[in-house]
């Protein structure tokens, strides 16, 4: 059974300096156009299965996910690796799958690192995310009053990066999911990845998947 460690990057003003907010973006600008057909059944579940549903390659190694509060849009990009060539010429490379839901309509697209160097750039950017140390929040200062922060967004976006744990043999023991809003270091990573890969998406999977 996979153990999910969900670490929410909610930063306390007493524990750390206030982080600056990443510009609030419209996610629909970062996915290919979705047709005007009728809404799809289970659109949200379709996107949510982006990193759980197995592909005809390896299980997803990394996934980025984003959602807008108060707007019916969610996006998932799952990164997998696969092989090209035979025997001694066999080489691994990265592939990516986009799933998005906008107003109940869904879209699925694919990208191959052999034609899209942005895939490796995004994975390198994810690798530079600062480490997260789980800790229980401190009790509030009883002499400090109640701090109300009106500087944040009333309705923010949610960003998440999920990575698989270190394998033991052929079994992955766990995964790590980091979730945050526009004040977290996840925001630029997710948005810049969506922008970087936007020109790369194709309607069918790479030929090596078949």
Image (cartoon, rainbow, N blue to C red):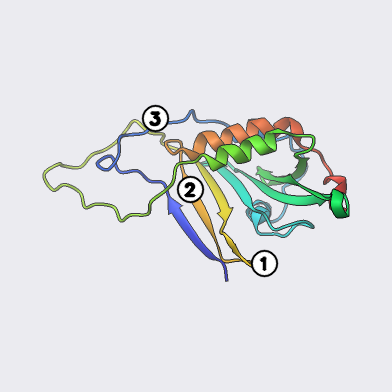
Q: What residue do we see at 79% from left, 34% from top?
A: 115
Q: Would residue 153 be found to the left or right of residue 50 on screen?
A: left
Q: Rate crowding at label 2 as few (under 14), some (14 to 19) or many (20 or more) other CA atoms within 10 Å.
A: many
CA–CA distance in space, label 3 to label 1: 41 Å
Q: Is mark 2 on a helix, strand or loop?
A: strand
Q: What residue do we see at 72% from left, 47% from top?
A: 39
Q: Quadrant of residue 35?
A: top right
First along the sequence among labels 2 and 1: 1
Estimate the x, y position of residue 149 in percent, counting from the top left. Answer: 30, 35
Residue 121 versus residue 48: which sits nearer the camera?
121
* Residue 28 visible in the displayed image: no
Measuring from the top left, give residue 185's x and y in whole percent: 46, 37
Q: Which of 66 and 81 is in front in this view?
A: 81
Q: Split into 4 quadrants, where in the image is the N terminus?
A: bottom right
User: Disc 3 or 1, which lies upstream in sequence?
Assistant: 3
Q: Mark 3 points at which residue?
A: 20
**In the rendered image, which residue does mark 1 sit on?**
170
From this viewpoint, which residue is outermost toward the top? Answer: 23
| Residue at 68%, 38% in the rendered image | 119
Position of 6 compared to 115: left or right? left
Q: What residue is pinned by disc 2?
A: 179
């Amino acid at each position: 059974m996979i153990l999910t460690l969900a670490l929410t990057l909610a930063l306390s003003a007493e524990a750390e300096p206030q982080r600056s907010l990443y510009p609030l973006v419209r996610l629909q600008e970062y996915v290919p156009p979705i047709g005007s057909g009728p809404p799809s059944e289970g659109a949200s579940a379709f996107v949510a299965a982006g990193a759980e549903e197995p592909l005809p390659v390896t299980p997803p190694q990394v996934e980025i996910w984003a959602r807008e509060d108060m707007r019916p849009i969610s996006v998932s990009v799952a990164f997998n690796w696969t092989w090209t060539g035979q025997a001694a010429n066999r080489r691994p490379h990265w592939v990516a799958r986009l799933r998005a839901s906008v107003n109940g309509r869904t879209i699925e697209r694919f990208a191959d690192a052999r034609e899209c160097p942005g895939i490796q750039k995004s994975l390198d950017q994810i690798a530079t995310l600062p480490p997260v140390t789980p800790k229980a929040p401190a009790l509030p200062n009883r002499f400090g009053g109640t701090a109300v922060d009106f500087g944040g967004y009333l309705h923010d976006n949610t960003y998440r990066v999920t990575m698989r744990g270190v394998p033991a043999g052929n079994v992955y023991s766990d995964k790590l999911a980091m979730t945050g809003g526009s004040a977290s270091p996840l925001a630029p990573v997710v948005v810049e990845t969506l922008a970087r890969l936007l020109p790369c998406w194709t309607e069918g999977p790479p030929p090596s998947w078949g």
